[in-house]
Image: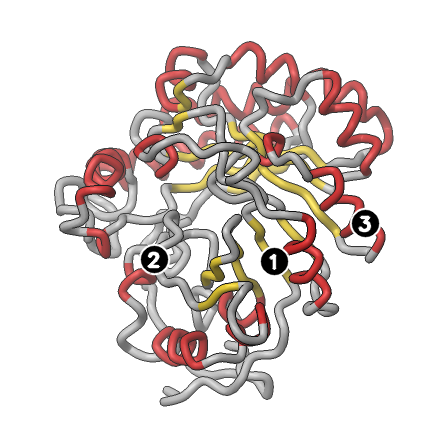
Amino acid sequence: MTSSAPGASLPVHLQVEVTAACNLRCRMCLVAYREPVDRRSGSLSVEAFEALIDQLPTVRSVTLQGLGEPLLAPDLPALVRLLAARGVATGFNTNGTLLDARHRALLLELGVDWVHVSLDAATPAVFEGIRVGASFERIVRNLRALVAERGQRRLPRLQLNAVLMRRTLGELEGLVRLAADVGVDRLWAQQLAHDLGDTAGREDFAALRAFTDGERLWGSPGDGGGGGDGVADEVADEVREVVRSAQALAAELGLDVRFPDVGEVPGGPGGGVDDEGVPHGVDELPCDWPWRSAYVNHDGRIQPCCMLMGDDRATLGHLDGPGGFLGAWHGPEYAAFRRALLSDEPPEVCRGCAQYRRRF
């Protein structure tokens, strides 16, 4: 095990929260538990975005999303055009409610590379009970229209994203059928991103932590948000059965799917880095975000990844700081974070992460 982390090369991927404003209040998202954000004041400016990209000629893809709804970002078209002019692939995840005719035409005109739409259930009641303010029928109608209008171009690549939790587990086969019927390219089901154990004692996370603790499939429910690496035996058996059945159905329907691994795979640090200080791979280290990617908030705060949910958790720098993004990327806080991630005592915020535990 190394005791220090060599300097990292520049990132090849970025995720940028172009806006913190959102038109929904999804129960597994911090947005639902905080005051609404104005779409103009709560969005990243074109100038700040361009300055960021100017520092990173290595970047090959950028995901334009964070906690907010990207289609609410006032300058989204300008950001996409800026990236396209530099040959950088780009896309985002949307809740799908704003994928009306105008926005669909805009996305096709811009040549966005991928669009992922959040759809966690195949029945309106279950879905709308999670994504408060959404209309299941409208989103499916918008999706069907985008598939049709895309035609044979195959761009943007279309994917349904579903958060797999206790109340949506029984919806998985229905989602497979729906995704195949609508004609999207892929269905991606993931578990809840974080157990939020590092926020214990924080009242501003209490309601979200309670919801997460009752819904997550990894870690035992009722353990206070800091659960173990495994899943409760009876839940694990049920999840495996559901996932196997859904995988078989997807193969039958010719649908590409990605489902989470709920097997007993140990999380934890790995055994080495390459010449640039990058871990040798996820088989040895469950997360390589701090070496290959970064997450930038709408207000310029720089964080190691997108799994944190909350701009005050593991902030490692600011775009307005000395040296901008590069000053933070090569700075002491990032270096310390990388060292800790390579050690037997990872940062506290990483310990409850589904990616780190290989449960995502």
Mark 3: amino acid:
Ala
How many marks overall?
Answer: 3
Contact between marks 1 and 2 (CB within 8 A): the answer is no
Q: What residue is shown with label 3?
A: 84
Left or right: residue 14 versus residue 144 is left
Disc sitting over residue 38 in the figure: none
Q: Secondary structure at mark 1?
A: strand
Question: For the residues marked 2 and 3, what is the alpha-carbon distance in whole angstroms?
Answer: 31 Å
Position of residue 236 in the picture relative to residue 112 (left or right) = left
Q: Position of residue 194 (x, y in %)?
A: 33, 49
Q: Can see residue 186?
A: no
Please state the horizontal and vertical placement of residue 242, each as a whole percent of the image: 39, 31
In front here: 286 or 141? 141
Q: Which residue is mark 1?
A: 14
Quarter-of-image position of residue 358: bottom left
Whether residue 300 sits left or right of residue 308 in the image: it is right
> Compared with residue 110, is residue 56 higher up or lower down, i.e. above or below?
below
